Image (cartoon, helix red, strand yellow):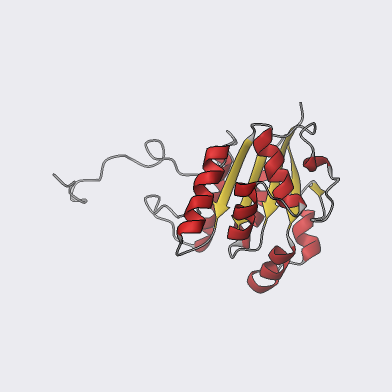
Amino acid sequence: MKRRLIVGISGATGIVYGVRLLELLRETAGIETHLVVSRAADLTRAHELDLSAKDLRALADVHHPITDLGAAISSGSFRTMGMIVAPCSVRSLGEIATGVTTNLLTRAADVVLKERRRLVLLVRETPLHAIHLRNMLAATEAGAIVMPPVPAFYARPRTIDDLVTATAARALDLFDVDVGRLKRWGEDIPTRAPRGGPVEDA
């Protein structure tokens, strides 16, 4: 079976996460990427990146228009590894959590859930109110993994690019895709502080 991964980009801030996922997957042999971008995401792209809509779509092997509800990824018979939505807006989260889908991005996510495939949502919103939290719980109960892009600092990142790449690589880990760009605790990073380092709480 051909290994295929769907990447959805919705309108929350943080479109760089979706871009970096596509870039890392281009470097990874044997995975075909299927991209769907919401209209709001294109507005965010214009604000946050010096990247044209054409260039964004060219990062994927296949691009599906957001309105194309007859696309291959709208059907469970089209086999995929699953889907990452990065970033995931709270509107997209709400549609996925309730199963009331209005575009190809949320329809594809719904298909991934019904087929019991992996769905990873990089929900980008703060602070969170009760409806956001209930929707996260509902999505989790349906089988999704809610992974807010919260940076880790134990690898001592030096740039924003380091933080973005580490988060994208961790998301791909959830599909057993190792892109070789992640410093791992207990492997690349020692689990004990050097002499003179921080003292553990008693």
Please say whether residue 120 is visible from this viewpoint.
yes
Q: For the view shown, which residue lies furthest in the bottom direction?
A: 47
Q: Nearer the viewer, residue 164 or 85?
A: 85
**Residue occupying the point 44% across, 60% down:** 158
Q: Position of residue 197 (x, y in %)?
A: 21, 50
Q: Position of residue 72 (x, y in %)?
A: 83, 41
**Residue occupying the point 25% across, 45% down:** 193
Q: Position of residue 27 (x, y in %)?
A: 68, 44
Tally of numbered tags: 0
Establish if 32 lies above or below 13.
above
Quarter occupied by the N terminus: top right
Establish if 39 lies above or below 121.
below
Classify residue 25 as left or right of residue 165: right
Q: For the view shown, which residue lies furthest in the left direction?
A: 202
Classify residue 64 as left or right of residue 193: right
Classify residue 127 as left or right of residue 27: left
Please say whether residue 147 is visible from this viewpoint.
no
Q: Position of residue 40 (x, y in %)?
A: 70, 66
Q: For the view shown, which residue lies furthest in the top direction?
A: 1
**Residue occupying the point 67% across, 35% down:** 114
**Residue occupying the point 31% across, 39% down:** 191
Quarter occupied by the C terminus: top left
